[in-house]
Image: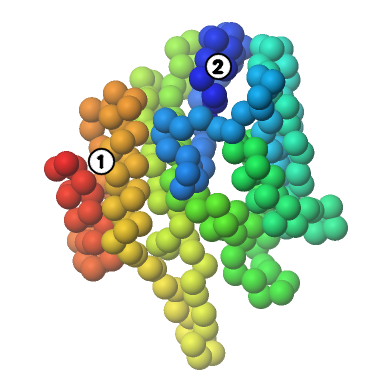
């Protein structure tokens, strides 16, 4: 989320990215609402934590920095390295989290996840980062732009996903040899929080409809709890 004083630069940025299929992903921390601005420097510049990541991540982050530089956006980047592939090159999770908390905004590249853990650790760095900062809302804006030859035209949707509990929490264990249990934990407070975030986002951005995606027909207790919270929030 950019600070309000960066608004004049957005139109200049849009001309540089015109014609690109847009897909943006944002992690929302507990103290960062859909309308809150990040911490800014008194002299008028913003510092963001930069995590280049793995694979194509550094290349994508470099493009973003080049665009910001060309548009004259007053932003500096504090680079931190976080990776599971090259442990000796990685900063500690604590150092990265401290940087993000200090700056209030982060540009993060892709963090690759190994297929197998050498030390038995189930949680990935992505999961740990979400837990440490309570990044509960994953926001993906998918929009097709005119002038591109794409299969699906006039696409403009926002997908909001809870990412601190549920299936992707790495809560699993082998109770006896050959028998694995994967736990899906659902809590009323977190279900209600993500539902409220979705409706607040829709209201702020002029979205007329919020669709709850669930499997309450099969997981009657877990997803049933989620669906009930969505329905209750929708009535307020």
Q: Nearer the viewer, mark 2 or mark 1?
A: 2
Residue at screen point 65% across, 38% down: 103
Q: Secondary structure at mark 1?
A: loop
**Badge number at residue 5:** 2
Q: Is residue 85 visible?
A: no
Front residue of 214 and 229: 229
Q: Name the element at disc 2.
A: helix
Q: Is residue 166 visible?
A: yes
Q: Residue at x 51, y 38 (%)?
A: 26
Residue 179 pos. (x, y %): 47, 85
Mark 2 to mark 1 CA distance (whole Å):
33 Å
Residue 134 pos. (x, y %) = 50, 53
Of the pair 127 and 211, the residue shown nearer to us: 127
Quarter of the image where one finds residue 6: top right
At horizontal 41% and vertical 34% (from top left) the residue drawn is 34
Picture quadrant where residue 101 is located = top right
Seen in the image, is 117 located left or right of residue 195? right
Mark 1 Cα shell of 10 Å, populated few (<14), some (14-19), many (≥20): few
Q: Is residue 196 above or below residue 156?
A: below
The residue located at (18%, 49%) in the rendering is: 231
Outermost residue toward the front in this view: 42
Which sits earlier in the primary sequence, circle 2 or circle 1?
Answer: 2
Give the crowd class for mark 2: few <14, some 14-19, many >=20 residues within 10 Å.
few
Kindly indicate whether the residue at mark 1 contacts the one at mark 2 (C-beta within 8 angstroms). Answer: no
Left/right placement of residue 224 relative to residue 205 reads: left
Q: Where is mark 1, residue-wise?
A: 211
Considering the image in quadrants, where does the C terminus appear? top left
């Amino acid at each position: 989320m950019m600070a309000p004083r960066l608004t004049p630069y957005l139109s200049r940025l849009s001309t540089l990215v015109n014609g690109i299929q847009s897909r943006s992903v944002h992690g929302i921390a507990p103290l960062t609402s859909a309308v809150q601005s990040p911490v800014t420097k008194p002299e008028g510049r913003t510092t963001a934590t930069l995590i280049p990541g793995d694979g194509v991540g550094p290349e994508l982050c470099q493009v973003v920095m080049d665009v910001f530089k060309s548009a004259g956006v007053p932003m500096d980047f504090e680079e931190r390295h976080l990776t599971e592939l090259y442990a000796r090159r990685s900063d500690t999770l604590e150092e990265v989290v401290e940087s993000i908390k200090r700056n209030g905004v982060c540009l993060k590249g892709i963090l690759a996840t190994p297929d197998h853990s050498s030390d038995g650790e189930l949680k990935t760095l992505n999961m740990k980062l979400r837990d440490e900062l309570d990044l509960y809302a994953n926001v993906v804006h998918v929009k097709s732009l005119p002038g591109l030859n794409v299969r699906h035209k006039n696409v403009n949707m926002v997908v909001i996903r809870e990412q601190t509990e549920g299936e992707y929490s790495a809560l699993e264990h082998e109770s006896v040899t050959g028998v694995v249990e994967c736990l899906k934990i659902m809590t009323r407070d977190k279900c209600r929080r993500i539902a409220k975030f979705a409706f607040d986002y829709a209201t702020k951005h002029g979205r007329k409809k919020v669709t709850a995606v669930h499997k309450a027909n099969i997981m009657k207790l877990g997803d049933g709890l989620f669906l009930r919270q969505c329905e209750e929030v929708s009535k307020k």
